[in-house]
Image (cartoon, coloured by chain):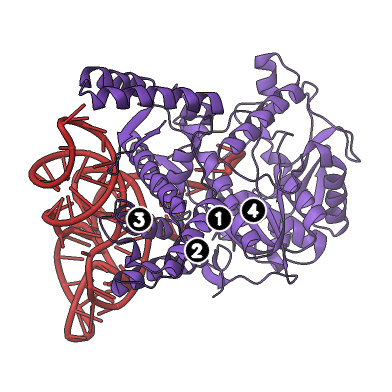
Chain colours: A purple, B red
Amino acid sequence: MALSIYNSYTREKEVFTPLTAGHVGMYVCGPTVSGESHLGHARPYITFDVLYRYLTHLGYKVRYVRNITDAGHFEEEGREAEDKVSKKALLEKLEPMELVQKYTNRFHWAMKQFNCIEPTIEPTATGHILEQQEMIKKIMEAGYAYEVNGSVYFDVTKYAASHDYGKLSGRVMEDLLETTRELEGQEEKRNKADFALWKAAAPEHIMRWPSPWGVGFPGWHIECSAMATKYLGAQFDIHGGGMDLQFPHHESEIAQSTICNHSAPVRYWMHNNMITVNGRKMGKSYNNFITLTEMFNGNNPSLQQAFSPMTIRFFILQSHYRSTLDFSNEALIGSERAFKRLWEAYQHLMAMDAGGSHTATDAALDTRVQHWINEFETFINDDLGTPRIIANMFELVPVINSLRDKRIPFHSISAETLRSMQEHFRVYLEDIMGLREENQQNNESFSKVMELLLTLRKEARAKKDFVTSDTIRDELAKAGIEVKDEKDGSVSWTM
RNA sequence: GGUCCUUUGGCCGAGUGGCUAGGCACAGCUCUGCAAAAGCUUCUACAGCGGUUCGAAUCCGCUAGGGACCUCCA
């Protein structure tokens, strides 16, 4: 069974075959570090983290490149085009690179919270100015770019005459040329559809570099093309990013790279859908975003409570990456409880002794269990069907809990099936979906204290001193520690 | 205005031409000193109207609602 992924370029699910056997080149558009990442940003990074994990699991050697955009792009509102990074820097009285570093650090911190594996290469736009300039030169030499007043523009009309500009984003050239919107700097362009490869910097513009065309800064799209080419080659396997980047960003990347490298750069384009709030895209322009820091600490008026990184990761994996996902407190609370239940069942499953070789006394149940776990692979191969894997896991939760509570006999399913279930849960839950234990703050001395308290409570209960026993349990609950009396007389606790 | 997508039970969300996804919430029961957890049960929906079909929530058309992109945007 092979992995199929939905290719935005062909609009079809395709069986994935890498360009070079055993190796995968994957590029994902990274963050613009002019501000804090918000919940919407978490989706692509978690989605493609799962893809990265799965490709690795399949045995591929994956080069995963995810850039940091620290060079800032124009903000074409009002009269003066301003660099987004330098504008914010002035407000905060920071050096541009200081600002960029701050948000880069925060981004890395958030990714770590989400248990996202770091990319194999994480190039910065500012670190690749030369590569970008070289690429622009090549495009000019090929005759597909022109210089005006120290800025260089890509000639989309000329490109479209012989190439399929607009195919990725479903755009029609005529429409692009007829757009009525008046944007700053348009008069320099030969056609409205043209886009900047290099922009001349105004004197007050802080981020600036010398170039053959004067002092300026690179256009937005060229950085990804330059860095992807440098680290993955003229053609590579997978390019991922948010749907909102399809146009103009990815469309332009295709055009630039095609001219420069004489081949279409990407074989599989993948786009994740947006996270919405009340049905509307979460985004800076709508001012309806919640930063990741706020999500984690609950410090935002839209939040009823804080939500842990694993709750958010689970929440995202519960929907398919190409569907919109609507944010709401109820939905997140639902995910929080669901994840807790699933994770506890997983812990119980792993604690079971799967040694031995007994056969199943309940063949029908054994068959169903096998069916559910075997489907994990079918689902992940079908364009990363994480929601369906999770649904099957929940089918198995009552089975696991019942085995544990001896509500159904331990030998109902065979030892082999039990081992297989343990293995499947571990691989899919931890290795592929990247979920992990929420709290790992249980250090040794703390455990000793807990042990002591629970012993005291046990003694109180034995004497039917429920006032004392309940006080211990209630006060622990207030501290966020839940005590549970299990069926077999033991006591467990979770934070 | 153009291009495209979407509309599933109280909420979130899978999915397929015929076989109750799943989660959360709610209610009932079992277990239990109580509680929590767990288990069992109940709740059976696919915007509306037509059409294709033996059969459609799933395909087609129309209508209505919502949204994305066309400008920085994950």
For the point 45% across and 21% down, the residue is A299
Residue beneath disc 1: A432
Decide: few, some or many residues near mark 4? Use Cα within 10 Å; few <14, some 14-19, many ≥20.
many
> Residue A253: image x %, image y %?
70, 54
User: How far apart are labels 3 and 4 at the CA level?
Assistant: 46 Å
Residue beneath disc 3: A400
For the point 61% across and 37% down, the residue is A112
Residue beneath disc 2: A380
Residue beneath disc 4: A250
Tell me the kind of residue under disc 2: Ile
> Residue A264: image x %, image y %?
72, 65
B3 horizontally vs A472: left or right? right
Q: Could you say which quadrant of the image residue A169 lies in?
A: bottom right
Q: Given this view, does label 2 or label 1 mark the residue nearer the observer?
A: 1
Q: Secondary structure at mark 3?
A: helix
Q: Given this view, does label 4 or label 2 mark the residue nearer the observer?
A: 2
